[in-house]
Amino acid sequence: MTREEFLNLYEKCLSEPCSEAEKALLQSYRDELSLSDNVWEDDDHNEEEVYARIWEKLRESRYPDHPFKKNNNHIWIKAAALLFLAGPAVWLYVRPLKPSQLVTKTKTQQQTAVIRPGGNKALLTLANGSSIVLNEAKNGKLTMQSGVQVTKAEDGILVYKPQERQSAAATEMNIITTPRGGQYQLILADGTKVWLNAASVLKFPAQFNGKERWVELEGEAYFEVHKNPSAPFIVHTSGQDVQVLGTHFNITAYSDENTIRTSLLEGRVNIFSGGKTTPLTPGFEAVSNQGTINVREADVQQSIAWKKGLFQFNDATIEDVMQQVSRWYDVSIVIADQPLPLRQFTGTISRQVPITEMLEMLRYTGVKFSVRGKQILVEH
C-alpha cells in the first residue's frame, strides 16, 4: 500500500462505513507508519503533512461546525488507532510518536523502563494447594477434580467440563488470580462465562451442586450467567451479594476502592447489602458503600470497555485515569503533594497502546509525568 492509498482509505473510513478487512489493513499500515524510523525517507510527502491532512479530514467530516479546541476544564482524548470507529467526541487528536522521538520528546520518556500493556495472565490454584500458571501452560487437559475435567482450550480460555455428578461434600474449591497487568477468561462447570480484569481473584467450586451457585470475587469481572431457575447464581464480595438466575453484568469490587459498582446489561439481579434487597434493571448500576446502595442510570458500555480491550473514560478525574493505568500496566502511581488541575477526561483509548503514548496524550491536559523504572510521578 502506498501512502496515498493509505490516506484515501483513511479518509474513506472517516466519512463512511468501512469493512472489517479495510479497518485491519488501515490499522496495519498505521502501525508501520508509527514504528518505522525511515518510512518517510525518499518520499515527496513528509510525516507532519500527512498527519495534518488526516486531522483536517477528521475535523471536516465529523465536526464541521466546531473549530479545533480544547477546554481548560474538560479534555476529550482518543487514540489514533480508534479514530475511525464509533465513539465519544474527539476534540483532542494526539498522533503516536516514533520510537526515536520517545527519548527526547518530553520528560515523560526519560529513564523509562520497558513497560508493556497487560495481557492474558493468571494463576489457577487447585483445592490441594497446587498451582498452574495458565499463560505458561500448554493447551489441553490440565487436571481432573470433583468429576470435572479442567482444560485450557485452543483460544486460551480455561474450561470446566463435568464428566460425572458429584455430591456437594465432594466439591473442591478453586481460585483463579489475575496479577496487575493481567486478565483472563474462564467457563465454569455450569456454563457461566467469566472475564476477569487485572488484579482480581475469583473463588469458585469445580462443580456446582445444591440449590445455589456461589462464587466469591475481589476485583473486577464480567459475568454471562447460564440460566438455571432452580439454582440462583450468587456473586459474593466484601460488601454485598448479587443474586441472579441468568443475566449479563459487570462487578467492580476492588479492595482499594470505597465503593462496589454493579452494572446490568441484560436480565435482572437482586443486590443484598446492609440487610436490604435492591433490584436492578438493565441500563442501570448499583453503587454500594458501607451498606448503602444507590441506583442510577449508567453507561453500561463504558463499564465493560475493559473487556473489549479499551480504556473508556466519562468525566473521569486524573486520579481515576491513573488508577486504571496502574493496574493494567503494572506500575505504581505517586501523586505529587500539590493541587492537580481540576479537569475531567472523556474518551476512548486502546489498552494496547504503549504507556509512553498514553502519557503523551494526557500530557496535553497540563499534567506532567516523571517515569522512574516502574513508578510514575504525577504533578502539575
Image (cartoon, grey):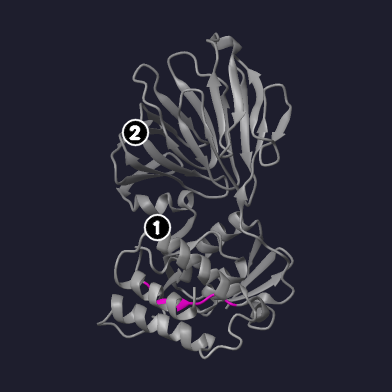
Position of the C terminus by quadrant: bottom right
Q: Is residue 93 magenta?
A: yes
Position of residue 27 relative to residue 191, above or below, is below
Magenta highlight on residue 79: no
In the picture, residue 138 is in which quadrant?
top right
Residue 217 drawn above or below residue 60: above
How far across and down, in percent of the image, does residue 186 sit? 54, 34
Q: Position of residue 36 (x, y in %)?
A: 62, 75
Q: Say which residue appears at 35% left-offset and 45% top-offset.
A: 285
The local crowd at label 2, few if under 14, some if 14 to 19, many if 20 or more residues have their Cα within 10 Å, is many
Q: Nearer the viewer, residue 240 or 282?
A: 282
**Amino acid found under the numbered disc labelled 2:** Val
Q: Count numbered badges in the picture.
A: 2
How packed mark 1 is, by other alpha carbons closer than 10 Å (few <14, some 14-19, many 20 or more), is few
Q: Residue 43 sits in which quadrant?
A: bottom right
Q: On the rendered structure, is 259 left or right of 65?
A: right
* Residue 269 badge: 2
15, above or below 350, in the image? below
- x and y percentages locating residue 246 in the rendered image: 36, 29
Relative depth, front residue between 218 and 22: 22
Q: Which residues are magenta?
A: 90-97
SS of the residue at dot 2? Answer: strand
- Circle 1 SS class: helix
The single residue placed furthest to the front in the displayed view is 1
Question: Dot 1 corresponds to which residue?
Answer: 20
Mark toward the viewer: 2 or 1: 1
CA gap between label 2 and label 1 equals 35 Å
**Nearer-N-terminus badge (2/1):** 1
Q: Is residue 339 visible?
A: no
Q: Give, as a three-letter code, the residue at label 1.
A: Glu
Query: Residue 40 appears in which quarter of the rendering?
Result: bottom right
